[in-house]
Image: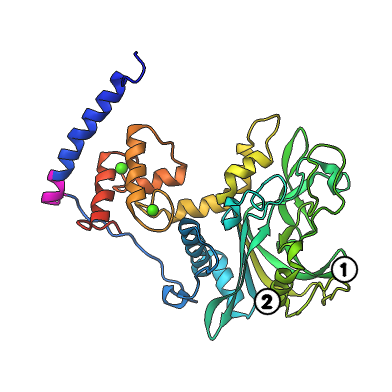
């Protein structure tokens, strides 16, 4: 084939698409498609109307902000475990969300660098204020991923733990016996984690995963595997060291009511093992980076990451919002463009994207789905 010539396959696709566009125009004119109404569940504790102020204010990426808002609302309204999240709010406790990969820092060459800083997580603390769930603390400078996850030497010889996505209890503790922090645990007193060595990955448990302040470049390992920072061997971090712990202090004040856990010269401790609510861990937006962080012999660790994010993926699958192929919470031009690319074979969707793009629910993504999505965006048909 001469340089610049279109393949026969490409020509056929273009012809096919031109014919299809004509067909679409006819369908738009006569509005042939049936309308299906999705069922919605009503929560007994809160309803959509109570959640108007659940809206992150510091994220500038519209798609990630929309995802975060949608998932916070989902968890608060969820019937799972007898309205576990809603009950904690009603009891006056905190619900702490970590959405890794949703911080604007992921677009920043320095702070978003997954090998060194990993300041990739957006964190929000939600509490009940005047009877409505309200965000009382936000930070974009957080991490849910340990340094050197395949290097047990950074965790006193024990394979480094990484908490699996999920919903867990938070208890007060003093990190390293030094300052007020939070312990992540399940009702069993431990938490499910993934552990990795240079040669294997396995699901295990840990009884000592904390949410604490960042301690960059302390105890940097000298083994040469990943000679970067050593801020955490499995815990979650809030705030940057360069901010003088201001964000961390604001975080711990929001959850525990301690104004300054860290002051630079002395630390403030808390009464330990008091139940303060829940933490919700969601890393689906950090998948690509996780696959590199945990890569083995140059191969992305896709299986491991799928296990780590399984909980959130199950929620997304159950949430299937028909039409929202790019999972930003609404049906827009981006969705029918994805459907078009799926039909043309130029885009490989995730399982949930494929499910969402299947607007007519026939189990595959086809021309009819593209047509329904485009008509929805043009306002001549409504996907509900
Ligand atoms: Ca969308
Ligand atoms: Ca379909």
Q: Which tag, 1 or 2, sits closer to the chain's start?
A: 1
Some atom of ligand 1 lies within 8 Å of the CB belonging to the residue at label 1: no
Secondary structure beneath disc 2?
Answer: helix
- Residue placed farthest to the front in the image? 3
Residue 149: where, in percent of width, then height? Answer: 75, 44
Give the quadrant of residue 180: bottom right
Q: Quadrant of ligand 2?
A: top left
Q: Report the side of 312 relative to 26 (left or right).
A: right
Residue 30 within the magenta-colored segment of the rendering: yes
Where does label 2 land, which residue? 254
Q: Is residue 372 magenta?
A: no
The residue range painted magenta reads 26-32
Q: On the rendered structure, is 123 left or right of 56?
A: right
Mark linked to residue 178: 1
- Location of residue 13 by image quarter: top left
Image position of 333 with respect to 384: above or below: above
In the foreground, 318 or 20: 20
Give me the residue at 32% from left, 59% from top: 38
Q: Position of residue 215 (x, y in %)?
A: 80, 59
- Horizontal and vertical percent position of residue 368: 25, 42
Q: Is residue 213 visible?
A: no
Q: Who's the residue at 74% across and 61% down the image?
A: 188
């Amino acid at each position: 084939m001469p340089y610049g010539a279109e393949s026969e396959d490409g020509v056929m696709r273009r012809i096919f698409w031109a014919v299809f566009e004509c067909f679409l125009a006819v369908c738009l004119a006569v509005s042939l498609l049936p309308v299906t109404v999705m069922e919605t569940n009503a929560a007994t504790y809160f309803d959509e109307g109570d959640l108007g102020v659940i809206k992150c204010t510091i994220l500038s990426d519209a798609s990630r902000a929309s995802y975060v808002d949608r998932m916070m609302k989902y968890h608060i309204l969820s019937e799972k475990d007898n309205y576990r999240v809603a009950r904690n709010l009603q009891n006056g406790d905190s619900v702490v969300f970590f959405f890794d990969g949703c911080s604007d820092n992921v677009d920043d060459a320095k702070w978003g660098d997954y090998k060194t800083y990993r300041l990739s997580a957006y964190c929000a603390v939600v509490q009940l204020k005047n009877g409505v769930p309200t965000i009382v603390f936000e930070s974009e400078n957080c991490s849910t991923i340990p340094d050197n996850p395949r290097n047990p030497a950074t965790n006193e010889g024990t394979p480094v733990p990484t908490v699996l996505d999920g919903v867990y209890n938070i208890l007060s503790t003093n990190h390293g016996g030094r300052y007020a922090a939070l312990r992540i645990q399940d009702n069993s007193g431990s938490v499910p984690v993934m552990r990795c060595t240079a040669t294997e990955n396995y699901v295990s448990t840990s009884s000592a995963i904390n949410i604490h302040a960042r301690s960059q470049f302390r105890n940097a390992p000298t083994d040469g595997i990943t000679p970067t920072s050593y801020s955490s061997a499995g815990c979650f971090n809030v705030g940057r060291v360069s901010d003088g712990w201001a964000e961390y202090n604001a975080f711990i004040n929001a959850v525990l009511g301690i104004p300054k856990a860290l002051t630079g010269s002395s630390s403030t401790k808390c009464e330990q093992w008091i139940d303060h609510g829940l933490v919700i861990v969601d890393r689906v937006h950090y998948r690509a980076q996780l696959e590199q962080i945990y890569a083995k012999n140059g191969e992305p660790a896709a299986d491991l990451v799928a296990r780590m994010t399984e909980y959130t993926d199950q929620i997304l699958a159950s949430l299937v919002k028909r039409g929202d192929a790019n999972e930003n919470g609404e049906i827009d031009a981006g969705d029918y463009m994805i459907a078009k690319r799926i039909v043309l074979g130029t885009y490989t969707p995730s399982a949930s994207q494929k499910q969402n793009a299947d607007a007519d629910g026939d189990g595959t993504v086809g021309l009819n789905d593209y047509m329904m999505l485009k008509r929805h965006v043009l306002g001549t048909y409504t996907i509900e």
